[in-house]
């Protein structure tokens, strides 16, 4: 009987504790410890956020440098295009003059052969 009583005394409080609500099962900590943990967590989150801000700023600076380089390349390409357009127009004008001279020379050659 003593064994049953001892066994029931060991098992009974455990069964009651296992049925207790979650709030009662948690180990209570001192207020100072909880506050310190919250402060540490907030500090870590702040540091992580500051790191993300720093990284985002760095990426933005890199993107701005890349954009500036691309704009310089674009301007250089526009200048080359304008120069090429001018060269094309000059070449077309030279071609028209050459065609006109060739036609005039052919006419003179025909007239010379007819004489």
Image (cartoon, rainbow, N blue to C red):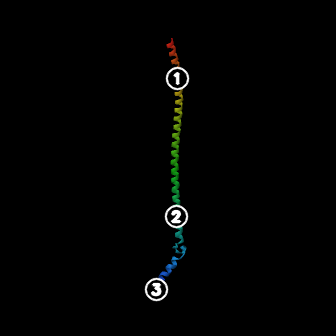
Relative to residue 60, is residue 8 depicted above or below?
A: below
* x, y percent for residue 100: 53, 21
Pointer 1: what residue?
99
Q: Which of the pair 72/96 is nearer the observer?
A: 96
How far separated are the C-alphas under marks 3 and 1? Answer: 124 Å
Query: Residue 4, labelled with which disc?
Result: 3
Q: Which badge, 2 or 3, comes first in the chain's sequence?
A: 3
Q: Which badge, 2 or 1, comes first in the chain's sequence?
A: 2
Point out the frontmost of discs 3 and 1: 1
Pointer 2: what residue?
41
Q: Give the residue displayed 50% in from the left and 81% down from the top.
A: 12
Relative to residue 63, is residue 103 depicted above or below?
A: above
Considering every residue shown, the one lying at the far left of the view is 3
Q: Residues within 10 Å of mark 1 (few under 14, many from 20)?
A: few
How far separated are the C-alphas under marks 2 and 3? Answer: 49 Å
Q: Which of the pair 39/81 is nearer the observer?
A: 81
How far separated are the C-alphas under marks 2 and 1? Answer: 85 Å
């Amino acid at each position: 009987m003593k064994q049953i009583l001892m066994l029931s005394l060991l098992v009974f409080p455990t069964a009651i504790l296992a049925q207790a609500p979650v709030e009662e099962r948690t180990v209570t900590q001192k207020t100072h410890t909880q506050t310190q943990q919250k402060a540490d967590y907030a500090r870590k989150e702040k540091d992580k956020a500051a790191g993300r801000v720093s990284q985002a700023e760095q990426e933005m600076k890199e993107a701005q440098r890349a954009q500036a380089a691309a704009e310089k390349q674009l301007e250089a390409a526009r200048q080359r295009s304008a120069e090429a357009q001018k060269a094309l127009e000059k070449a077309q004008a030279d071609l028209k003059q050459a065609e006109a001279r060739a036609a005039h020379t052919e006419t003179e050659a025909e007239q010379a052969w007819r004489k």
